[in-house]
Amino acid sequence: MAEEKEMAFLDHLEELRWHVVRAVTVIFIMMIGAFFFIEEIFDRIIFAPGKLDFPTFQYMCKIGNLLGIDELCVTQLPFKIQSRNMTGQFMMSLTAAFTIGLIVAFPYVVWELWRFVKPGLQTKERKFSKGAVAAISFLFLSGIFFGYFILSPMTIWFLSNYSISPMIVNEFDITSYVSTLASLILGCGILFQFPMVIYFLSKVGIVTPELMRKYRKHSIVVILILGAVITPSGDPFSLTVISLPLYVLFEISIYISSVVVKRKLKQEAAELRADQQNS
């Protein structure tokens, strides 16, 4: 009996290994593809949030003109990017290629993990989890979109214009620039998964809307801490930009939890009535 359990456990590990291997392979293929076009990627994607013609800055200026607020027009981004390490440009090319490969392959990675988990679920659990891969991928890409088009350009704009003395010139190292951009974007993608986490926790009864409402004030502190972790610069502007949408996600998660709990109670009541009728 013990040997059968051990074999079953080893079989599951073997199956998990192949799912992981396929997921990592797709990430690696996407990474290689990105590396071949790394110059165009740096010029058109990575360095784009640091340019005045970036769409976010253009829309900000249009809104500023409509509202009569000239300060919304970004007129300068006074910084230069340098590489002070011999391997700086090469290592950042690999980092950027891996980050893009991970983002592009993320839906497939989630799908592979779902294929591993799905056989172990009951029919009812599979029904509840229907569309999970699409929802997780959508939230992740929404976070990526927010991090790239909102948080990143706002952070670059604030930090490049912040100065404590005119004697100091902002010359950012390529390592600092790329790592900051990657952490901002991927961090947003991960944190935007919060509604899905609450959904599944509410399904198993660990989280309830009453519990979340009770600790709403505490959540603000946690959100600020998470925002500080995501924004390596630690500046208050970037912290505010990331914390506000996180709090909105928290409120959305309360609504999701309430919907899940109500449906769960209705289902339990229906099952109870069916059992009473059968008995």
Image (spheres, rainbow, N blue to C red):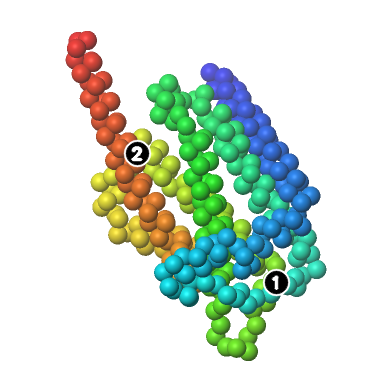
Q: Residue at x 52, y 30 (%)?
A: 117
Q: How many marks?
A: 2
Q: Secondary structure at mark 1?
A: strand
Q: Which mark is residue 122?
A: none
Query: Residue 278 in the image: x percent, y percent?
Result: 22, 10
Which is in the foreground here, disc 1 or disc 2? Answer: 1
Within-10-Å neighbours for mark 2: few <14, some 14–19, many 20+: many
Within-10-Å neighbours for mark 1: few <14, some 14–19, many 20+: some
* Residue 138 makes an appearance in the image: yes
Query: Residue 235 in the image: x percent, y percent?
Result: 50, 72
Quadrant location, the C terminus: top left
Within the image, what quadrant is residue 165 found in?
bottom right
Q: Is residue 99 above or below residue 175?
A: above
Q: Is residue 3 above or below residue 221?
A: above
Looking at the image, the residue that sits furthest to the top is 278
Q: Residue at x 41, y 45 (%)?
A: 195
Please, what is the three-letter code of the amino acid marked with disc 2?
Ser
Q: Which residue is denoted by mark 2 in the rendering?
A: 202
Within the image, what quadrant is residue 126 found in?
top left
Q: Is residue 223 above or below residue 82?
A: above
Q: Residue at x 51, y 35 (%)?
A: 133
In the image, taking residue 232 as reference, residue 35 lies left or right, namely right
Please, what is the three-letter code of the amino acid marked with disc 1?
Ile
Decide which of 241, 94 is in the foreground and name it: 241
Q: Is residue 197 above or below residue 112?
A: below
In the image, taking residue 228 as reference, residue 113 lies left or right, namely right
Q: Secondary structure at mark 2?
A: helix
In the image, taking residue 137 as reference, residue 174 lies left or right, namely right
Q: Residue at x 25, y 28 (%)?
A: 266
Alpha-carbon distance for marks 1 and 2? 46 Å
Asked if disc 1 and disc 2 are in contact, CB closer than 8 Å, the reply is: no
